[in-house]
């Protein structure tokens, strides 16, 4: 009997949600210039607003991961996507800095559950070889969704303004839930479209994720590997958050580009990062993943150090794209390591890593804002801190062995 391919529709749902999530998440960077003009925000206030998402995203990672492990992906994701889409829309209702900060904070709390639950979903529905590739493709689609956000946001804002623009973006999540919830099942064995041959192919994955393996979830969180995974992900995110928060502002205010030109250039780092994830996920399993990660982060640091000394905007953005490509080589490696460690607590372990990493989503934009406020908008100081974070992330991988479970 030939196996059905229902699992590939699950992958399609994961890819589409990754894109939607990033479009809704990254649009604030492109919208910040008109928002700041209307609400009279200074550099430090813009940093606080941009950091609100990262703070709540980090704080709610473990609770949202635990919900997915306890209640199931279908129920939790269905609720969360509607919840965060509501606050995407309410971003457009902000009338001052405080109301905008609250909307972004609550929005981040909802999105915190996205990737831990998608990771659990793919882990139950895919055999290990396909799982690693699917993780790579999912992160690539997320990055490409983020790359689409600046031009999409520019198009929407230029036609309906930034307030109604966020309402339009919210409808993407509502449409996704309307299709996903009636179709999806947490356990492949409960899906009518899965035949016996496909179910046999997925038995090992189902046992890994859906069955009790005897260790309490909280004991997993004290393992050394998780501490280093979290630290390297914090450092990775510290650098990466510049691309989705301050980059359009840098291009417009420091490099003198128009909003349309900035939107075009802002697509490059996230687009290149997506290709980095793809390359990493499709590397032969014989290549040690830890050295891929170390090389990727050290290369990122060198490239970012060069950017402040490059007068050409095009050359600077190509270097930034190459830096993003290099650091995103680590994405499939990090998330698949969470699966190997977490097993039936995959969502909890991956959310722990993502929590520790995405505290940088709060720290980085705020720190960048205060650095710019204190240095009369000297972006070179911001970029040197980004390079330092990339070096520390590379050092962390000396203490992690993502290939240990396959040895």
Image: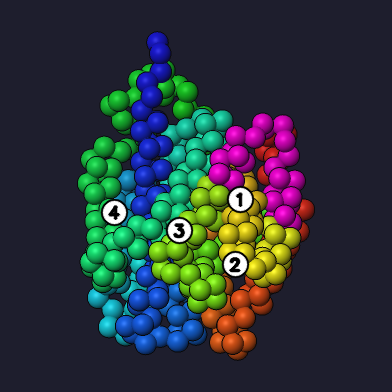
Mark 2, Cα crowd under 10 Å, few <14 / some 14-19 / many 20+, is: many
Q: Is residue 260 left or right of residue 219?
A: left
Mark 1, Cα crowd under 10 Å, few <14 / some 14-19 / many 20+, is: many
Q: Are marks 4 and 1 in contact (CB under 8 Å)?
A: no
In what element is the residue under mark 3?
A: helix
Residue 49 falls inside the magenta stretch: no
Whether 41 is drawn above or below 108: the answer is below
Q: Is residue 286 left or right of residue 259?
A: right
Q: Nearer the viewer, mark 1 or mark 3?
A: 3
Q: Which residue is mark 1?
A: 325
Q: Could you tell which of marks 3 and 4 lies nearer the N-terminus?
A: 4
Q: Which residue is mark 3?
A: 264
Q: Could you tell which of marks 2 and 1 lies nearer the N-terminus?
A: 2
Q: Which residue is mark 2?
A: 238
Q: Position of residue 66 (x, y in %)?
A: 44, 56
- Dominant SS in magenta: helix
Q: Is residue 54 left or right of residue 353?
A: left
């Amino acid at each position: 009997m030939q196996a059905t391919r229902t699992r590939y529709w699950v992958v399609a749902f994961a890819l589409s949600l990754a894109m939607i999530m990033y479009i809704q998440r990254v649009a604030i960077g492109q919208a910040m210039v008109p928002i700041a003009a209307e609400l009279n925000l200074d550099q430090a206030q813009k940093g606080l607003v941009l950091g609100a998402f990262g703070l709540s995203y980090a704080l709610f990672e473990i609770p949202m991961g635990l919900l997915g492990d306890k209640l199931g992906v279908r129920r939790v994701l269905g609720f969360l996507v509607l919840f965060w889409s509501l606050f995407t829309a309410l971003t457009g209702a902000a009338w001052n800095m405080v109301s905008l900060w609250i909307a972004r904070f609550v929005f981040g709390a909802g999105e915190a559950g996205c990737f831990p639950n998608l990771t659990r979903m793919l882990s139950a529905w895919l055999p290990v070889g396909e799982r690693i590739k699917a993780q790579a493709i999912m992160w690539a689609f997320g990055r490409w969704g983020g790359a689409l956000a600046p031009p999409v946001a520019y198009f929407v804002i230029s036609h309906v303004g930034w307030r109604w623009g966020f309402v339009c973006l919210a409808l993407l999540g509502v449409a996704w839930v309307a299709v996903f919830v009636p179709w999806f099942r947490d356990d492949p064995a409960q899906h009518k479209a899965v035949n016996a041959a496909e179910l046999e192919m997925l038995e090992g994955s189902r046992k890994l994720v859906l069955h009790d393996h005897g260790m309490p979830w909280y004991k997993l969180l004290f393992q050394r590997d998780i501490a280093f995974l979290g630290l390297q992900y914090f450092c990775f995110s510290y650098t990466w958050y510049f691309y989705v928060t301050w980059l359009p502002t840098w291009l417009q205010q420091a490099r003198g580009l128009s909003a349309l030109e900035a939107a075009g250039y802002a697509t490059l780092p996230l687009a290149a990062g997506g290709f980095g994830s793809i390359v990493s996920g499709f590397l032969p399993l014989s290549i040690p993943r830890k050295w891929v990660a170390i090389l990727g982060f050290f290369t990122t640091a060198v490239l970012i150090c060069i950017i402040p000394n490059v007068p050409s905007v095009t050359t600077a953005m190509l270097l930034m794209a190459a830096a993003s490509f290099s650091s995103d080589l680590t994405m499939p490696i990090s998330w698949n390591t969470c699966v190997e460690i977490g097993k039936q607590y995959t969502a909890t372990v991956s959310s722990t890593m993502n929590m520790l990493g995405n505290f940088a989503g709060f720290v980085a934009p705020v720190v960048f804002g205060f650095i710019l406020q204190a240095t009369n908008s000297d972006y070179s100081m911001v970029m040197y801190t980004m390079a330092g974070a990339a070096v520390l992330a590379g050092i962390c991988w000396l203490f992690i062995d993502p290939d240990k479970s396959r040895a």
